[in-house]
Image (cartoon, rainbow, N blue to C red):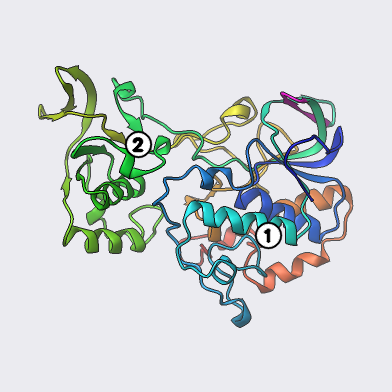
Amino acid sequence: MIWQDDIHFPSHMRVAIVGAGPAGLGVARVLRDLAIPDVWVLERGEIGQSFLDWPLQTRLLTPSFPGNVFGVTDLNAISYDSSPGWSLQCEHPDGSTYAQYLEQAAMAFGINVQCGIDVLELRSKGERLTLVTEHGEFTADFVIWACGQFGSPSDDDLPGAALARHYACVRDWRDIPGEEVFVIGGYESGIDAAIGLAQAGKQAIVLDRGAPWLDGDKDPSRSLSPYTKQRLDTVRESLPITLVPDADVIALEQAANGMHILGSDGRCWFSAGMPILATGFGSGTEPVSEWFDYDSHGLPMLTAQDESVALPGLFLVGPEVSHNGHLFCFIYKFRQRFAVVARTIAGRMGVDTAALEIYHHNNMFLEDLACCDDDKCLC
């Protein structure tokens, strides 16, 4: 049941899930399998809004393969029994195409989704949590925060950042003016920007304090994904991309007919147009940051059940979940935590959790954090 316009959900919900992306819909599906009543997904835009906001040329980094019949869950699926690789018939979907899969999944699984609800604040009173929205206040026994990070672009506190355009604010690389465009930052979004600009016929110059494109780390959470490296190698054979390592950008300054990009080593690059900031994203928990404690890396601190250490009843799912040094930042990683959250909520409600056994068999449930060490991590 998906409501796009009028408000149809109740004033009190057993479980309120904020965000209708893969994290929110995925955990809602598990709760539905447990027959927990009054579970609602609240979305400020449309289903998959973050993906709809991607640049048109951006693709999912992980490949989609319809291997469910062989017992292998699609890496980009939100559940063990669905596959964007099968339903979309493409290996690396773009944002709008993947959003179609999410909407299809929500309808097929009978998930209650209310679009057009922007949760502005969360309050705690007694055993209930209150969600403050522009449509009024609503209460819930449990809140699962499932907002991604794409809606929280970060300029990395770069002086003069207002002179640049963040990656998240670009819809089509063909619309970027100028023949030469600087990109500040060389990780996934930076290289994706460079490839998009080069394919649009522009000279892309990537400045990065390190050289992520040379990093040999096998964990795509720490280095460029194989898909990005493959795209970069292919494009550089024929298109104009310049990669500048050891370029620690410390500020942007207005100049005549353009701007200066200043490096910590005294180097200065002149840019006639607005550079692209590929400086990453902040926390998707910002609207409710008062109810989370954060570690030295800026990640929300969670219990073993992915519950906020600062507010019982508030859970987190999605790319910011981290345990024992492992960041569950890809869909195939963070979906492993859905059943952990669902089992905790069901246990407090006194609901039978036997249905979760199917998630064990489909490798989508980490039984406990002890298995997530360097040798056995399922991610």
Prevalent SS, magenta region: strand
Label 1 secondary element: helix
Q: Position of residue 298 (x, y in %)?
A: 47, 34
Q: Is residue 201 left or right of residue 108?
A: left
- How dense is the environment of label 1, judged by Cα within 10 Å: few (below 14), some, or many (20 and up)? many
Q: Earlier in the sequence, mark 2 or mark 1?
A: 1
- Residue 130 painted magenta: yes
Which residue is found at the position 26% from the left and 29% from the top?
274
User: Which residue occupies the foreground of this view, 85 or 143?
Assistant: 85
Residue type highlighted by circle 1: Ala
Specify the farthest residue to the bottom: 70
Residue 279 numbered mark, or none: 2
Residue type highlighted by circle 2: Thr
Start-end of magenta stretch: 128-135
Q: Position of residue 83 (x, y in %)?
A: 60, 68
Q: Position of residue 111 (x, y in %)?
A: 76, 53
User: Which residue occupies the foreground of this view, 93 or 230?
Assistant: 93
Residue 61 numbered mark, or none: none
Task: Indicate which label's residue lies in the foreground, 2 or 1.
Answer: 1
